[in-house]
Image (cartoon, helix red, strand yellow):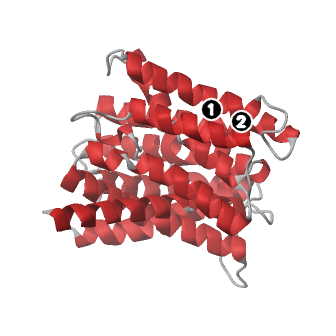
Amino acid sequence: MRRDWAALLALLVLLGAAWGMTQPLAKIAVSEGYRHFGIIFWQFVIGAALLGVITWARGRPPRWEARHIVLYVIIALIGTLLPNSASYTAAIHLPSGILSIVLSLVPMLAFPVALALGLDRFSGLRFLGLLLGLAAIVLIAAPETSLPDRAMVWWLPMALVAPAFYAIEGNFVARHGTEGLDAVQVLCGASLVGIGLALPLALMTGQWINPLPPYGLPDLAVLGSSILHALAYTGYVWIVGRAGPVFAAQVSYLVTGFGILWAKLLLGESYSAWVWAAVSLMFIGLFLVQPRGKEVLDAAHPLGDDGR
């Protein structure tokens, strides 16, 4: 039993490290001119390929009735296409570690959305967690010395778009369900549909990324981020089924922590005392809003790509 628990904990740490790596990879992906629609198209392609192999190996491929297609379109839009467009745009202007901190707002923003939809009851502790999360953003934005360049503060609202969409997505799934599909089936179907949505956008905006060599660091970053997300999410779904959503929800801390660590190691980023204070507030806020019992599967992570 103790060995099983240690193995689950090790897997959780591995998932956090993998998801945390996706933010620095996003920064690298946009470093030489690649832009969101082109990157997202190839993320859909790579994700569909990996998740397709997993779903067919399990004998549970996506289903294609009309209601399933509608679900795939919605998840592709609010879980990947729209939030990732904002994230990659923000990644051009903001440090990777800041993006990791901002993405921690997902479970906090999910709380007021759930209240508005009647999916949750008011909780003083969770409301305090939301306030602490917002206070963390103020600590990043307000002080003159919090960011390396004061002009970066104007891109924080763009970075906030992604966690807002992920919060909406999680509550959408909680309210409407997944039409009898599991999370991996939904993600695979959404990735396949997303290919059709992202391809014309990439072509029309001139953001198409040529898949032929030579390959540079941005190409490897797109490939690595897509693979890490698909594998990490599959592992997350498995660990929820094995250890429960409360245990799995703790990956939020690890994703943020590893995101900052990888940014420091790979990109050489450093942060002011204000940012470290914001990290502390965000972690306390995460603790207060985490699920305490048998709650919605995606209280900590939505179905789509959360940039991790």
Q: Residue at x 67, y 68 (%)?
A: 266
**Residue 65: x %, y % from top left:** 28, 47
In the rendered image, the vertical position of residue 32 relative to residue 84, given as above or below: below
Q: Is residue 60 left or right of residue 66?
A: left
Q: Secondary structure at mark 2?
A: helix
Q: Residue at x 77, y 63 (%)?
A: 31
Q: Residue at x 47, y 21 (%)?
A: 128
**Residue 18: x %, y % from top left:** 48, 64
Front residue of 286 and 276: 276
Residue with the mark numbered 1: 136
Question: Which disc, if any, is residue 140?
Answer: 2
Q: Amino acid at mark 2?
A: Ile
Question: Which disc, if any, is residue 206?
Answer: none
Q: Residue at x 67, y 46 (%)?
A: 98
Q: Amino acid at mark 1?
A: Ala
Q: How many marks?
A: 2
Front residue of 138 and 53: 138
Q: CA distance from mark 1 to mark 2?
A: 6 Å
Whether tag 1 and tag 2 are in contact, CB under 8 A, the answer is yes
